[in-house]
Amino acid sequence: MSGEAGPETGGPRIEGPRIADPEETGGLDIRGLEVRYGPVRALRGVHLSVPGGAVAAVLGANGAGKTTLLRAVSGTLRFHRGAITSGTVAFGGSRLDGVPAAAVVRRGVVQVPEGRRVFARMTVAENLRAGALGVPGRRAAAARERVFELFPVLAERAHQRAGLLSGGEQQMLAIGRALMAGPSLLLLDEPTLGLAPLMAARIADTVRQINAQGTSVLLVEQNAAMALALAERAYVLEVGEVALSGPAADLAASDEVRRRYLGVGAPETDRPVGTGPGPAPGPAPDPATDPAAEKHERTRLARWTA
Amino acid sequence: MAVFLELLVNGISVGAVYALIALGFVVIFKATEVVNFTHASLLLAGGYVIARLHPLIGFWAALAAGIAAAALVGALVEFLILRRAHVGSRGVLAIVTIGVDILLTTELTRQIGTEVLALGDPWGDRVLHLGPVTIAETRVVALAVAAALIVAFLLAFKFTGWGVAMRATAEDAETAALMGVRLGRVSLSAWAVAGALAAVAALFLCVFPTPGLDRGTAAAAMKAFPAAILGGLDSTTGALAGGLIVGVTETLMSGYQSELAFLGRGIGDAAPFLVMIVILLLRPSGLFGTKEPARV
């Protein structure tokens, strides 16, 4: 993980890695994002950033808007009749909103879709080749080496039909296929969903390795323990809004997050389980870029972790 | 026996030409999930350009121009109409293609009028004698060319980046887009390839023993529809098998028409559709319609 460790700014028990400005580091920067599927608003006022080289996690229940958020970045909302109705998505300083999916890939942002979605009728090798279609041919061979290093089993099964791989192997293939494009930012949608715990841990290790090699990661996960262990920064989405964000370690320590997403019992607080997590309605501004929001967030976190 | 062999060889040759048309049909369906009823008019357009240009620029140049023209018409239909028709259902798009087909065919048949246009091919009405079997040279050439084109196409489909993009899109368009595949280009190229194949088919549908290109040629092209459907709409192998089945059935039924007089005249034209219905009753997704490999 390349996120710099260091105190955020004082505050008892509130420490975490310092998050760099995504504009400076060529990271992902989402501001005031609103997404609609026809009349249905799926996201509202979402601020989120993934600095270059960092791992950020997005937590949230089913239907919170996690997958929509990734679609907005990868340019695939149109496949679901959705559209960005306000706000911006930028990567490395250039806008991604309104850019078609294939062009997003060429800018170095590649998504591993939920449910793996390998090309079942094609072989493992052909799947990997498909992953490299958006990049010049020369880079594909080097990328394949890297993928086979990460996932030796894919080399062994190169000529097998992808539909016949196990769930874990299919997830490896889906990640490997995305890496073929040599992404600067990898978007992972529920990579451990439906996998055995051992395989989930293996995928987590792989994400760590991929990140160590310089690829930023935006990880959407229901497995909050894994996501918070991997990420430097985390965001909690509730009903289309960022309900909470902060350094992952702080979120992991927060009673509310522990109780709701980590399944750990916590002492009674002033809020019953199952209600909104924060006292502040509306979208949470991004504390990485907004000092006032950072202070506000510390206050909220302090209350929860007290 | 000699008659049967002659009919069989002729049937295979005609079937190979149908397979070319069916292949284009299948390629468009795989890339865009649209059932393309414009196919017959693409074929007619290619044939028309060859027929009009060969007296001016010679047969081979006219053939190249006809192939290019049909590819261009296909690409234009995709680019100008289908890409912009933001309708929800693929069924509606199929009906849009019927509309486009009627427009194109009406204009082309108006141009052709009552003429029968020769395509100026170099094979003429020569025949080959292979033992007891006598066969038109055009049929042998048709078989060879169709086989070569089909092999080249299947190799490209299997091994080139274009083929991988095409198959990925056919399987899951959204995920293909996430891999950087430009869906617009895939769709455009599918239409262009289908148009080009249709133009080659037009040539062989209009040479000896057929008198030439006339307003009925589009109807002949329609026989490739049952070929594509009985083979399995999403299967290239199915297009080949379907083409051959339709070609052989039609030729045999027409050849033995006098013995089959109780079935009425024109049974050769109806037979491909009967075969299609029987096959679909037995195998609803066609002979080679893909079933997902799945772990259980």
Image: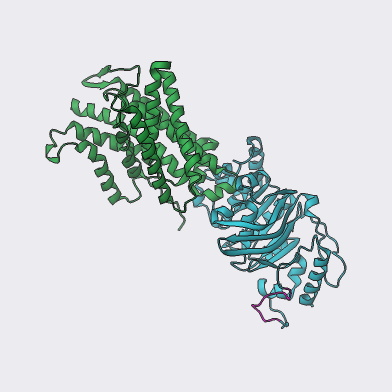
Chain colours: A cyan, B green
Q: Main secondary structure of the magenta part?
A: loop
Q: Is residue A190 visible?
A: no
Query: Residue at point 54% right, 44% down?
Result: B183
Taking depth in this image into account, of B121 and A227 the one nearest to the observer is B121
| Nearer-the-camera pick, B42 or A109 | B42
Residue at 42% over, 19% down: B60
For the C terminus of chain B, the quadrant is: bottom left
Q: Position of residue A79 (x, y in %)?
A: 54, 53
Q: How many marks?
A: 0
Residue A231 drawn above or below residue A133: below
Q: Nearer the viewer, residue A116 or B259?
A: B259
Q: On the picture, is A78 further left or further right than A11?
A: left
Q: Position of residue B78 (x, y in %)?
A: 48, 40
Residue B103's place in the image compared with A1, above or below, is above
Q: Which residues are magenta?
A: A271-280
User: What residue sits 74% from the left and 69% below the top?
Assistant: A251
Q: Is residue B138 magenta?
A: no
Residue B185 is at least partly visible in this image: yes
Image x and y of residue B155, in percent: 47, 33
Q: Position of residue A233 (x, y in %)?
A: 75, 62
Relative height, residue B196 to residue A285 (above, below)? above
Q: Residue at x 47, y 44 (%)?
A: B82
**Residue sticking out furthest to the right:** A10
The image quadrant where one finds the N terminus of chain B is top left
Hey, which quadrant is residue A81 in on the image? bottom right
Relative to A278, is A2 above or below?
above
